[in-house]
Amino acid sequence: MKENQQVEWKESWRDEFLKAVCAFANSDGGVLVIGRNNKGKVVGLANAHKLLEELPNKIRDLLGIVVKVNLRGHSSREYLEIVVEAYPNPISYRGEYYVRSGSTTQALKGAALYTFLLRKQGRNWDGVPDPTLRLKDCSAQALRLFAKNATRSGRMDSAVLRDGRGAVLENLELMEGQYLKRAAGLLFSDRPESRVSGAWIKTGFFFSDDDLRHQDEVHGNLFEQVENTLKVLESKYLKAYISYEGLQRLETYLFPMEAVREALLNAVIHKDYSSGIPIQISVYEDKIVLWNPGELPQNWTLKKLLGKHPSKPFNPLLANALFRAGFIESWGRGIEKIRRACEEHGIEPPVYDLSMSGLMVTFHANPQHLAAATGGANGTTQETTPKTTQETQITTPETQPTTPETTQETRGTTPETQITTPETRATTPETQITTYPGTTQEKILGLLRTQPHVSSRALAAQLGLTRDGIRYHLRKLTLEGIIRHVGPTKAGYWEVLEAPAKAPAKAPAKSPAKSRS
């Protein structure tokens, strides 16, 4: 037997070990063994009989709980077992609260303490009444949107949906007496962050971890946040690769949108809104990372999360409303849906990480898909954009208009906006743009050999290209190992490592391999 969530060993007794007793009572119970060393070997207690009489009274007086103290072993090898039951009410030691985390005792502070006390009262953060929130603060538009989705999903009585906002909120268990609960403000108010700090979503495109190129903020009620964040990702951040079925051209995102949507919904539902930190989505050339300041249910591990498990949302009222609106399933199938969507898309399941003061989910692109989206090893460049709709031509991160980097509040995309890539001023969804960039890249390489300290602005002026176009080629040449930048961004210089192979004069365009979709 080893030390674990419910077992701890101590060679001798000190009163500070009352913290461990307190932690067992606040968690799932446990046994504190006095007279074993940290390897589990019985070393015995000289004062075992004295402690057998003193400890039950001391624990009762200082913690207010009753425990069993059992004498074990024999003669000089006697030791004590303090058996602690789990208590439904919070237990403190000298005004401090402790819980078990793995095989350690942890003191609770701040938001963690607040959440712990709520749970001991049978409450969750989203179920606490907000005395400042009134029915009039709930957006009629948000309620109509919910009613429309709930009607379509068939998961809520249509008669309730017709009875007005009060009936809808009461049916969703979002009212307690005359007060609305916190979840109602997140779901149905236009600006939930006015009541809950950080109740919005932040998205950014990164060239590297320390090189943020542009970012957006998505505000509004949670239904709008989910939908508009996905629109922003599709229209501005995510790249697609091109494949063909016969003569039909197909554009497929590097990441399965079904899996990204499910991961985003999980972040919204399981987020610890008391943290005051927004959900953050970081998009890179080859991966997308979603992070939220949440935590797993008590005593859960990543292994349990990734296996078959029950539905246990951190914010059950939010989960219930999103379920009624048809946004999620109710049986804890989100992880499995993400895994299956990734498998069907031809990428590995995402990586889950709990070491960053929250849950981080990272999707990695299939290298073959990425090569098809950014240019293959044959020296050709496959110009690709995110999927297009009938109304809008969408752009990729590296083909943004040449405007200063800005942060904007986003409510969705406008169908009137036509955005083009750096090297093509008129692209249509029907046109396959396959070029041999050898001439442009050879000019760039020639300039870099003679002017290693040249800036992207100077390169653009000399070659008659936009700065975004120059950056696009510089990045491709860097990723292909043809050039590298040495030194700081502004004071460094370019080093040419090798020249790219020249393309034949009139080689036919090669389409990427058919994607799994």
Image: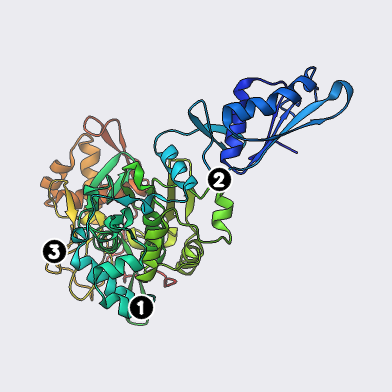
* Contact, mark 2 vs mark 3 (Cβ under 8 Å): no
Toward which corner of the image does residue 169 lie, by quadrant? bottom left
204 relative position to 363: left or right:
left
Question: Which of disc 3 and disc 2 is earlier in sequence?
Answer: 2
Q: How far apart are marks 1 and 2 (CA)?
A: 36 Å
Name the spot of residue 503 as percent of width and height, x first: 31, 61
Q: How crowded is mark 1: few (under 14 residues within 10 Å), some or many (20 or more)?
A: few
Three-letter residue code for mark 2? Pro
* Contact, mark 3 vs mark 1 (Cβ under 8 Å): no
Q: Name the residue under label 2.
A: 88
Three-letter residue code for mark 3? Arg
Above or below, 501 against 418 in this view is: above
Q: Is mark 1 on a helix, strand or loop?
A: loop
Residue shown at 43% from the left, 52% from the top: 362
Q: Is mark 2 on a helix, strand or loop?
A: loop
Q: Name the residue under label 3.
A: 425
Q: Name the residue under label 1.
A: 157
Q: Quadrant of the C terminus?
A: bottom left
Name the spot of residue 23 as percent of width and height, x first: 58, 35
Kindly tell me whether residue 388 is visible in this rendering. Answer: no
Q: Which of the two discs, 3 and 1, sits closer to the camera? A: 1
Exactly how many numbered labels are in the figure? 3
Residue shown at 19% from the left, 67% from the top: 140
Q: In which quarter of the image is the N terminus?
A: top right
48 relative position to 175: left or right:
right
